[in-house]
Image (tube, grey):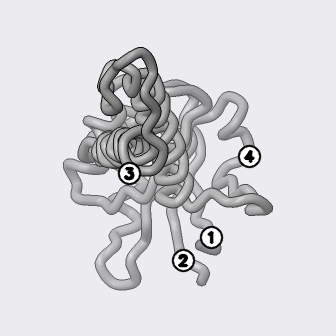
Amino acid sequence: MLKNFLVATFSDAPRLISAVRAARRENLSIYDVYAPYPIHHLDDAMGIRRTRLPWVTLAAGAGGLLSALLLQFYTAVIDWPLNVGGKPDNSTLAFVPISFELTVLFGGLATVAALFLRARLFPGRRERLVADAVTNNAFALVLRKHADSFNTELACWVLRENGAEAIEEKLIDL
């Protein structure tokens, strides 16, 4: 599905952040911001909420801990109890290493899987760059142009006032 966007490129990060803040002040619809490296406080400037990814990690880690404890308790107490030197069958201290390892494993794998699902990353997907040098040395701000409510002249003026080097309209397949 082709959508209409306005793409502005910048030469450095401060101009990009300034343009993002100005675009938010003017209630322009920011689709995404591209940079060749992470920029501090860009999330705050864009108004992005904190991620819920740590909750996925916590839930999966708790599931890994529970599955490790249940499996070890089942095998050591119910299925195959062994009397080793008179020690109790359900020795919790013996369960700690495996429980820790499965907590970390389940939490890590679930975090990576949730990130890939949320970002729609999958093998064989082709990259879609909005500007030519985005992965090298350019910064880009992409505004979504809605059919009736988008003022292109205002958007271009705001972007140029904040240091945009180039502004172009693009149709991008989402």
C-alpha distance separating marks 1 and 2: 5 Å
Q: Residue at x 34, y 69 (%)?
A: 151
Question: Which element is circle 1 on?
Answer: strand
Give the residue at mark 4. Answer: 132
Q: What amino acid type should be assigned to the residue bearing mark 3? A: Trp
Q: Which residue is drawn at 36% across and 33% down?
A: 42
Binning the other alpha carbons within 10 Å of mark 4 as few (below 14), some (14 to 19) or many (20 upward) gives: few
C-alpha distance separating marks 1 and 3: 22 Å
C-alpha distance separating marks 4 and 3: 23 Å
Q: Where is residue 170 in the image (x, y as percent from the top left)?
A: 61, 67
Q: What amino acid type should be assigned to the residue bearing mark 1? A: Ile
Asked if 71 appears above or below 29 in the picture, the reply is above
Any part of residue 163 in sight:
no
In this rendering, would 149 be left or right of 137?
left
Give the residue at mark 3. Answer: 157
| Quadrant (top left/top right/bottom left/bottom right) for the C terminus | bottom right
Question: Which element is circle 2 on?
Answer: strand
Asked if 47 appears above or below 118 in the picture, the reply is above
The residue nearer to you, when weighing 145 against 88, is 88
The residue nearer to you, when weighing 84 against 68, is 84
Question: Which element is circle 3 on?
Answer: helix
Q: Where is residue 135 in the image (x, y as percent from the top left)?
A: 69, 37
| Contact? badges 1 and 2 (CB < 8 Å) | yes
Give the residue at mark 2. Answer: 3
Q: Residue at x 38, y 51 (%)?
A: 157
Identify the mark nearer the N-term, 4 or 3: 4
Q: Position of residue 121 (x, y in %)?
A: 62, 57
Identify the mark nearer the N-term, 3 or 2: 2
Asked if 148 appears above or below 82 in the picture, the reply is below
Identify the mark nearer the N-term, 1 or 3: 3
Give the residue at mark 1. Answer: 172
| Contact? badges 1 and 4 (CB < 8 Å) | no
